[in-house]
Amino acid sequence: MPSNHAINLRTTSGAKMEDVRFSFGVTSSKVRDRPIREGQGFSIELPAVLDLLETVAAGEEQAADARELLLNVVDTLYDSAGCYDYETVEDKLAWCVRDGGCQTCEEQRSSFAHHLETMAERWRRWTLPDEFPFATGSSMGLHTVKCGVVRRDMPDGFTAHKPDDVAPLRAFAHAYDDFGLPVDESEQLPAHVPFQPMSGEEARAWMTENTGPKGGRYYKRCRMCAPTP
């Protein structure tokens, strides 16, 4: 939401500018579109701009210093103005790479840890085909673990990441946009294991859970491998 802020400034020459009013999210022009951290979305009261320009015209301040002063305001107000929520997906990722982490990564850290545990358990089960002979994936299909469909999509090996591994955490946290859609559908999540191997008992329970009260099935039994839990 739009927000208003008041801040006291001190120029390089030592001049004080008290109670300078800034706004965020009120108005902006696409003609000068740029990242938020470079001023996009911020507005400043015109009298303060004119006063700052007067110091430059009088030779009391360098234009570069005036520019730096205003950009420092963006850094100062960034969190209180809630700027992060308005960043583009691309800019969030770029700043995350630059800073070695970001708010999105912190918010997704516990989910990433759970994801790693889930994928590690899937892989462990995959290495025990006699104990877990059936499998299901995101498309709600039931297969045997020997099915060609399953073996085609399963990885050749498994990389066990730690929850604090920066690069895998970033890849996981930034995999989806603000609408929950994948940023790059060709990219897999770190340590991704697409199928969940199940024992015969688990498969039968899964079939029951995915069968409606009138017998309608919410899953498909693979015709190629014809699983019979």
Image (cartoon, rainbow, N blue to C red):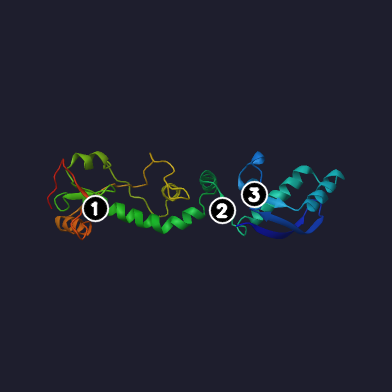
Q: Which label number is shown at residue 41?
A: 3
Asked if 215 appears above or below 126 in the picture, the reply is below
Q: CA distance from mark 1 to mark 3?
A: 47 Å
Left or right position of 125 against 88:
left
Q: Residue at x 32, y 56 (%)?
A: 117
Label 3: element kind: loop
Q: Residues within 10 Å of mark 2 (few under 14, many from 20)?
A: some
Q: Earlier in the sequence, mark 2 or mark 3?
A: 3
Give the mark toward the camera: 1 or 2.
1
Would you say 158 lies left or right of 143 here? right
Is residue 139 or residue 156 the one in the foreground?
139
Please state which amino acid type lies under the numbered disc 1.
Tyr
- First in sequence: mark 1 vs mark 2: 2
Alpha carbon distance from label 1 to label 2: 40 Å
Residue 166 image point, x, y percent: 45, 50
Label 1 element class:
loop
Three-letter amino acid code at disc 2?
Tyr
Give the left or right position of residue 109, taking residue 208 as reference: right
- Residue type at the position of mark 3: Gly
Looking at the image, the residue that sits furthest to the left is 228
Q: What number is the disc on residue 84?
A: 2
Q: CA distance from mark 2 to mark 3?
A: 12 Å
| Image quadrant assignment for residue 157 | top left
Disc 1 or disc 3, which is closer to the eye? 1
Question: Taking 209 as reference, is 140 above or below it?
Answer: above
Question: Is the residue marked by circle 1 packed among few (<14), some (14-19), or many (20+) residues within 10 Å?
Answer: few
State the quadrant of the N terminus. bottom right
Q: Which residue is mark 1?
A: 218
Quadrant in the picture for residue 186: top left
Question: Could you tell me residue 223's position as x and y percent?
Answer: 16, 42
